[in-house]
Image: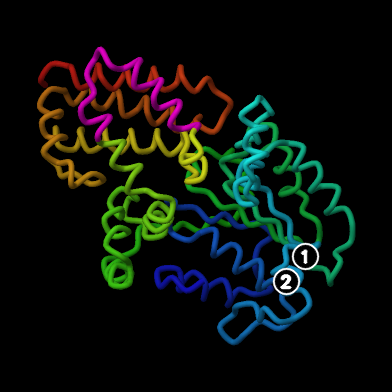
Amino acid sequence: MNHSWLLPAWQRLVELDERLPHALLFAGPAGLGKRELAEALAARLLCDAPQADGHACDRCEPCQWRLTGNHPDLKRLVPAAELAAAEGEDEGEATTREAGAKAASTQIVIDQVRVLQAALNVTGHHGSRRVVVVDPAEAMNGYTANALLKLLEEPPAGCVFVLVSSAPRQLLPTIRSRCQQWLFGRPDEAALAHWAARADPETRALLALGGGMPLAAERLAQAGGAALHARFVRDIGGLQAGEVLRLAAQWETWLKSKEALAAGFGLPELSAWMQRWVGDLAALRLGGRVRFFPAQEAVLAALASRTSVAAASACYNKLAHIRKVSRHPLSLRLVLEDMLMRYIRAVAGARG
């Protein structure tokens, strides 16, 4: 964990040491390295001999367990779909899924908390310290969140919970209140300049789309983000009213394609891009500047001249709602049709 914009937070965590609370919430935009910070903290807490800078030694027995993915005192609550993507699948497995096997859940489900609770009832395997990482915390549904809340209210001795969230407002207020909140924001210009000096041109070009978050730009570039971005702006920039249903069908196929699945590009990411596109439209209509799609400013300006502030704002708010529920089981085609119909109505609105 060597991101310059996270070093102050890391130093504070190291200084707290044994005074760390039983639950922390790392909250802030995606693409800042919150997950890496959480994993670095977990590694430190479980290490027998942390280094002078606070990082785990990676040499002791607990570190070796962790590095091989077998540390019995490190638990992670993550969506099953993310685990499946991380482990990968061969062609036969992909064919089975396409043939109708149940897709892995994009939520953290209550059964995962039940398994965790049973595991935490057992004494730690190496000392008394145990760590639970919940990421992304907003992937918990209501039942899961309430089950986790009981653990946060009566935490097992020596257990530290680290929740990671890019959408903390989606968490239950009671969950947030049980955690010490660490809020992270966009890196300052000096940190971004340092990062940009080492990044390749394609990655730097995706920084704006990533909301100015360096790691989001890096992940996007590594996942073929340039091609995804090119298709998105081509499709949405030239969309006509009579093409909505056709494009919704095409996007459904696109999001289910091997390329999109391999890139981790699904409805949550697409709805976020739509929201940012409409956000740029609204900004231009209000006399502001394009933030996320600077290379498409001319296209956005033409579209902005056809909409109204009210229409753009209403569309933006609806997209925010779609983005909020995009990880829940939904009819993908219907959501895409609804999203595109609302958008096309907004850009076909009267001046205002």
Badge count: 2
Tell which tag, 1 or 2, sits nearer the viewer: 1
Q: Residue at left 37%, top 48%? A: 225
Residue holding disc 2: 46
Query: Is 316 positioned to the left or the right of 300 in the image?
Result: right
Please report the residue visible at 66 percent of the width from the left and 55 percent of the height from the top: 133
20 vs 344: above or below = below
Crowding around mark 2 (Cα neighbors within 10 Å: few <14, some 14 to 19, many 20+) is many
The quadrant in which residue 115 appears is top right
Nearest to the observer: residue 331 or residue 308: 331
Label number found at residue 71: 1
Q: Amino acid at mark 2?
A: Leu
Q: Whole-Å distance between the Cαs marked 1 and 2?
A: 9 Å
Residue closest to the eye, 46 or 261: 261
State the residue at coordinates (69%, 28%): 101
- Quadrant containing the C terminus in the rendered view: top left
**The magenta stretch spans which residues?**
234-256
Residue type at tag 1 = His
Direction front: furthest residue:
92
Q: Residue at x 27, y 30 (%)?
A: 235
Residue 262 at what x, y percent from top left?
51, 45
